[in-house]
Image (cartoon, coloured by chain):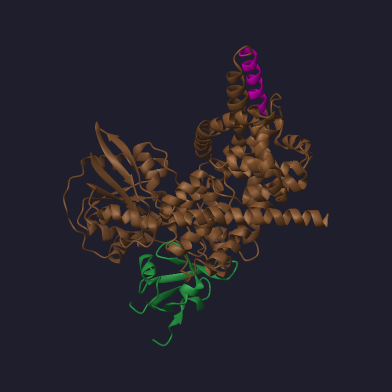
Chain colours: A brown, B green
Amino acid sequence: MKKILLVGNPNTGKSTIFNALTGKHQHTGNWSGKTVGNASGIMKYKGREFEIIDLPGIYSVNPMSEDERQAVDCLKSGIANLIVVVLDATCLERNLILASEISKMCTNVIVCVNLIDEAEKKGITIDIDKLSEMLKTKVIPAKARKGIGIDELKEAIYSSNTKCSRCCCSADCIYKNCVYSNSSVTENRDRKIDKILTSRVFGIPIMLFMLCCILWITIWGANYPSGLLSSFFSRIEKLLLYYFADSPIFVKGLLIEGVFRTLSWVVAVMLPPMAIFFPLFTILEDLGYLPRIAFNLDHIFKKVNAHSKMILSMCMGLGCNAAGVISTRIIESRKERLIAVITNNFMPCNGRFSSLIMLAAVFISGGMFASIKVALAVTAAILSGVLITFIVSYVLSNTILKGEQSSFILELPPYRMPQPIAIIRRSIRERIVYVLFRAVVVAAPAGALIWLLQNVTVNDITLLSYIAGFLDPFAQLMGMDGYLLTAFIIGLPANEIVIPIVLMCYTGNSSLIEFNSLSELGILLRAHNWTYITAICAMIFSLNHFPCATTLLTIKKETGSLKWTVVSFLVPTVVGIMLCMLANAFFHIII
Amino acid sequence: MDNVISLTAVPINTAVFIFDIKKSPCRDRLYELGFTQGTRVVPLHISPGRSATAYFVKGAVIALRNSDAKNIYVNAEDSLS
C-alpha cells in the first residue's frame, strides 16, 4: 500500500484534511501543537487503498521539540511514496519556506493550499497555476473544513507518479510572483478581538470570567440529566432485584449491589458534567483562544522560570491529565518539559472536577443561586491548582530542575468560528464511549471489590471497616475520614470512581438513593458527619494527589524514566497531604 | 547603518525591517518563523504583564518574549531594497 505523508506548518489544517481523506475523527484544534503524535488512516479511492499519515506541524526540517522530531524523522526516513505539503493560504509567505525546502528534497510532492476561503476574505489572491509552475508540483486549492478540494486531492494522490523535479526558486521569489495581498494587518477583525482579549486591563479578568462561565454551564446543565439517569438506574436496580430475588447472594449482592450500582453511580454522577464540559472547552480551543492565554500569562511563567507553553498542556490537563502530559511534547527544553509533566496533575482533570462539583455541593446547599455558587467554588479550586502549579514550578526550577530559561515563541492563530453542532455531536459521543469504557474496565471491578470488602467479615467486622479504621487516624489529621482516604486509594486506576466509591461505602446495603440534582447528594454526605471542613479537605486532596494509573503510565512512557514517574507521583501527594493537614489545623484552631 | 534599533524599542503598529539577529539559542527558530533579514515586522500587541509582544511577520502573528525580541535588530527602511 502506498504511504502518503501530510506535512506542513503547525495549524494549517493537516488533521482536518486527514479526517476528510480517511473519514476518521482525529482531534483538531486552532493552535500550533494540537497534533503531537503521528496518526494514520486508510483512504479508499477508486478501488485502491492508500495509507495516510498525519504528522505534527513543523516549521522546517530541523526539529526543535519532541513533536517536531517525530515528524521530521518520519519525513526523512523515506518511507513515504508521496508527500502532501499542506499550506495555509493566509500565511503563504512563511509557509512557502517549508514547501520549497521539501520540494528541494527530491521526493514526490503534491502541494495543497488550504484555507483558501479565509485568504479570500482577507483580500489575498493566489495564482495557483503560477505557484504550480514555480514549485514544479501539482497544487490543489482547498477549503478542508467545508470539504471543498478534497476530491481533487484524492484524485491527485491517486494519479500521482513518482517523478522528481526539483524546485529551484526561493520562497520569497515564489511568494512575490504568485500572491497578491491587499490586507491591512493592524486594523483587521482579529486585531480588534486581540486588543480586548489580551488587553492589560481586561485580558486576565475575561479569562477568569470565561472559566467561571464554562463551569457554571457545566454544573447547571449536568443537574437535570444526572437526576434523570439516577432515577432511571434506580428503577432498573429495583427491577433487577425483583427478578433475581431468589438468586444466590453472589449474583444479587456482588453483581447488582456491587458492580451495577457502582457503574450507575459513575454514569449518573460523573458522565453528565464530563459530557458538557468537554464540548465547551473544545469550542474555546477551536476559536483559537488557548495561545492567547499563554500570551496573557507569560509574565507569571517568566517569574517562576517555566515555559509559557506549559499553560497549553495545563489546559489539556483539564480534560485529561494523560492527554496533558502528552501535549508537553511541544515544549522544546527537556528541563521545562519535565516541570510541565510533574505539575500537570495540579490541574483537575474532567473526572476530578466532577468530584469537585459534588464536594462543593456539600457546603453549598440548594437555593436560587446554588449552581453559580458551586461554579465559583470550583473556579476557586482550579485557580488554587494554577497557583500551586506556579509555586511548585518555581521550587522545581530552582532546585532539582535548575537551568537557563529558554525562549518563548508562540504563534497566535487567526480566530476561527467553531462548528458547535459538529463539536457537540462528536464530543458527546466520544465522551460517552470513553466514560462507559472506563466504567466497565475500572468501575465494575472496583464495585465488586467494594462489595466484597463490605460483606466479607472477620470477627463480625467487615474488611472495609478494618481498612477504613486503619486509615482513619491519619485521614482525621488530614480533615477527612478513613472511607474517603480508602476511596482515593482504590480510585488510583481512575479518578472518576472516587466519589462513587465513597457513596458506595456510605450507602452500604441500603437501596440505591435517588436524587434530583447534584446538590442533593450533599445531604447524604452531611448525614455521614461531613462538615464543610471535610468537604474542603477532600477538595484539596482531590486536587492534589497522585495522578491516576493511566497518567502515571503515560508519564513513564513520555519521560522514559522511572525516577521522574516517581517524582510525579510524590510531588502532588506530599503537597496534598501537607495542605490538607494545614487546612484542617487552620479551621480547627481558628473556628 | 546608523538608525538600527532593537525590535523591542519599536512602537506598536509601526512597520520596520529586520537588519540582523544577534546569535542566541533561539536564532534558528526565529529564522524558520520568517524573521529573516529584510523581512517586514509590525509589533501589534503587548501582553498584559508587559513581558511579551505579538508581532506580525510573513502573514502570521507570532508572540515573542521581550528578552528574545531584543536580540532582533531592525531599521525603519528596508536596507535591501
Residue, x 50% and y 73% (percent of image)? B66
Residue, x 39% and y 70% (percent of image)? B35
Percent from the top left, x then y, of residue A302?
A: 54, 68
Q: Is residue A401 above or below residue A28?
A: below
Residue, x 65% and y 46% (percent of image)? A215
Q: Give the range drawn in magenta.
A: A228-244
Quarter placement of the C terminus of chain A: bottom right
Q: In this view, does B25 lie to the left or right of A226?
A: left
Percent from the top left, x then y, of residue A512?
A: 69, 25
Percent from the top left, x then y, of residue A81?
A: 22, 46
Q: Main secondary structure of the magenta part?
A: helix
- A166 or A346: which is nearer to us? A346
Which quadrant of the figure has residue A134?
Answer: bottom left
Residue A242 in the magenta stretch? The answer is yes
- A322 or A61: which is nearer to us? A322
Q: Is residue A396 left or right of residue A4?
A: right
* Residue, far bottom: B2
Q: In this view, does A203 lie above or below A108?
A: below
Quarter placement of the N terminus of chain A: top left
Residue A216 in the magenta stretch? The answer is no
Percent from the top left, x then y, of residue A272?
A: 61, 35
